[in-house]
Amino acid sequence: MKSVLELKNTRGSALIWVLVLCIIFAILGTAIAWVALSMNKRSVTNYVLRQDYFTSRSALDTCVNELNGLAEGQSYNNSFNAYLNDHLVNGDKKMVITDFFGTAGATKPEIKNMGKCTVDGNYSKGTITLNAVTGTASEGKVSLTAYRKVDDTNLNWPNARWAAELPVSNGMFALGGGNPNFQNEDNVVKDVAVYKVTTNQAGTLEITKDTNTEKKAIFIYVQPGVTLTINDVKVSNPVGVASKSDNSVEAWFDGGDTIDWNTYYGPDIFIFLQGTETQKATLAFSKNLSTAGKDIPYPLYVSGTGGTQAVVNGPGGSSKTLVYGIHNATSTTVDFKKEKDQVPARLPISGYAYAGVLATGNETGLKASQWTVQSYTNGSDTP
């Protein structure tokens, strides 16, 4: 029979083990709780970061959708589409919206908890860049680039009925102003200029800005039996626009050199030669362009009715006259830099095809800008 002392020792040992086990379970419980709390905190943080990302992404997608047109029945005046065109595509070509969704001061939780989103953007060299920032972490910083989409299934250029007589004064052809034939057309896109040449003309192309709506493309149609001779090409600022300002013609050039047409990103200029079997239409150049000892192209995309009906002539000599592109027109003295399948190395940025045909009948041939996203970039991807 165990003594009282032995029983006490046994009970003491059991109590110690119970105490040790309790301490172990307490430590495990604390650790599990800490891990659970940490994971929950991380989940909440990740949720917030994801929300910041999607808020910023949503803001950018909204801008692109609005750039691509109005909702059915929506008026252009005072619309977000009008704001983007007036400030981002035209005007100063930049914008900043500090509270895109209007969440600042909101009281509803579903709006208040979205986070304040700031959007800024600029338009340069045919590309729109938009940046959105929600919160302070890199995940909430999202950017995109977008450009005007070319519809390869629709090669139409504006109908010739829109064409006004090519304005000429003192040997200068003034391009890019308002088109009087659009004034009475409420539903016409007025971001192009369309001209026609009905008699033999010679002069310098002078590209300027329309201070109301900058032109994304300029079209010149040379009628049958007519020769248009181009002596030179230049740009000029309209009255009231300071040289080398954000809204000046110098901003059309990468680097500001207004005689290097390799760096030009202003309105696309298209020429169509409307020749027939009995009366050809001709585009002629009186000289080649060059700068810093190298040949440079005229900023022109030339199309025609084909064969001997549409002819493009340069002055001849040891080198050919260069343009951006030629399609369906005959030339032995004018050429362009090309990729495979005779596609111009430099493509238009206006959304119109480089190889065009004139719209006929009830077709207007006028295209609303359709912007397509080139890429998205998230701040967390940036090293």
Image (cartoon, rainbow, N blue to C red):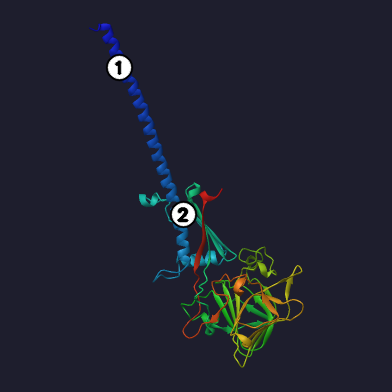
Identify which residue is drawn at 69% across, 68% down.
Answer: 260
**Relative vertical location of residue 359 with respect to residue 349 in this rendering, above or below:** below
Identify which residue is drawn at 37% across, 37% down.
Answer: 36
**Relative vertical location of residue 32 with respect to residue 157 in this rendering, above or below:** above
Q: Which quarter of the rendered picture does the N terminus lie within?
A: top left
Residue tagged by mark 2? Answer: 56
Identify the secondary structure beneath mark 2. helix
Q: Horizontally, is 131 left or right of 245 in the view?
A: left
> Label 2 is placed on what type of residue?
Ser
**Relative vertical location of residue 270 with respect to residue 65 in this rendering, above or below:** below
Q: Quadrant location of residue 226?
A: bottom right
Q: Quadrant location of residue 319?
A: bottom right
Using the numbered discs, state the Cα–Cα distance from disc 2 to disc 1 in whole angstroms.
Answer: 61 Å
Residue tagged by mark 1? Answer: 15
Nearer to me, 341 or 37: 341
In the current view of this chain or complex, which residue is farthest to the left?
1
- Disc 1 packing (10 Å; few <14; some 14–19; many ≥20): few
Nearer to me, 30 or 73: 30
- The image shows residue 171 at horizontal and vertical percentages of 70, 82
- The image shows residue 216 at horizontal and vertical percentages of 56, 72
Q: Horizontally, is 301 left or right of 83 in the view?
A: right
Identify which residue is drawn at 67% across, 64% down.
Answer: 256
Identify the secondary structure beneath mark 1. helix
- Residue 80 in view of the camera: no
